[in-house]
Amino acid sequence: SWTAVFKSIPTMVALAAFSLIHVPINIPAFAISTNVDADMNAELIAHGYSNFIVGIVGGLQNYMAYTQSILYAKSGGRGRASSLAVAAVTILFFFVGP
């Protein structure tokens, strides 16, 4: 119903604002914590593309979870293979549960 859509507008605006501010806050903090140089342009573009694509298919916005990212980096997560493995396990848990 359109009433439900109009009632959810404040929530949608808040989520969009949060999505805009979390990347410039979390990426530099992550870069400092892991001693790597972060390319903010590349990060913002990647987050923009991923949020756009997910928005088209009706999914949830992308969010860089700082603590999980630090845990991944400190436990030796490097490269595309380990990132894809984490994504595959996450997708598996999403569909079949833990």
Image (cartoon, rainbow, N blue to C red):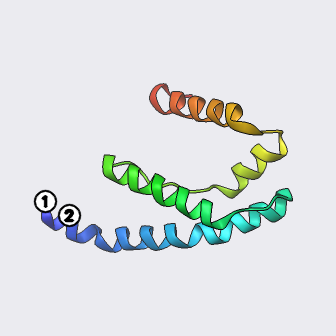
Task: Locate the N terminus and report the quarter of the image it occupies.
Answer: bottom left
The residue under label 1 is 1
Q: Residue at position x 36%, y 69% from top?
A: 11
Q: Nearer the viewer, residue 56 or 3?
A: 56
* Res. 34 image quadrant: bottom right
- For badge 2, the amino acid type reads Ala
Residue drawn at the location 59% of the way across and 29% of the way down: 89
Occupied quadrant, residue 15: bottom left
Q: Mark 1 and mark 2: span between their CA atoms? A: 6 Å
Task: Give the percent coordinates (x, y) of residue 88.
Answer: 57, 29
Tell whether 39 sits left or right of 73: left
Q: Residue at x 73, y 38 (%)?
A: 79
Q: Position of residue 67 (x, y in %)?
A: 72, 54
Q: Residues within 10 Å of mark 2 (few under 14, many from 20)?
A: few
Residue drawn at the location 52% of the way across and 27% of the way down: 92
Helix, strand or loop at disc 1? loop
Along the horizontal axis of the image, is 52 left or right of 43?
Answer: left
In the picture as drawn, the residue positioned furthest to the left comes out as: 1
Q: Nearer the viewer, residue 83 or 17?
A: 83
Label 2 sits on a secondary structure element that is helix
Position of 18 with respect to 5 (left or right) is right
When the figure is inspected, residue 90 is found, relative to residue 45, above or below; the finding is above
Q: How many numbered circles are shown? A: 2
Which residue is at the front of the view, 47 or 22?
Answer: 47
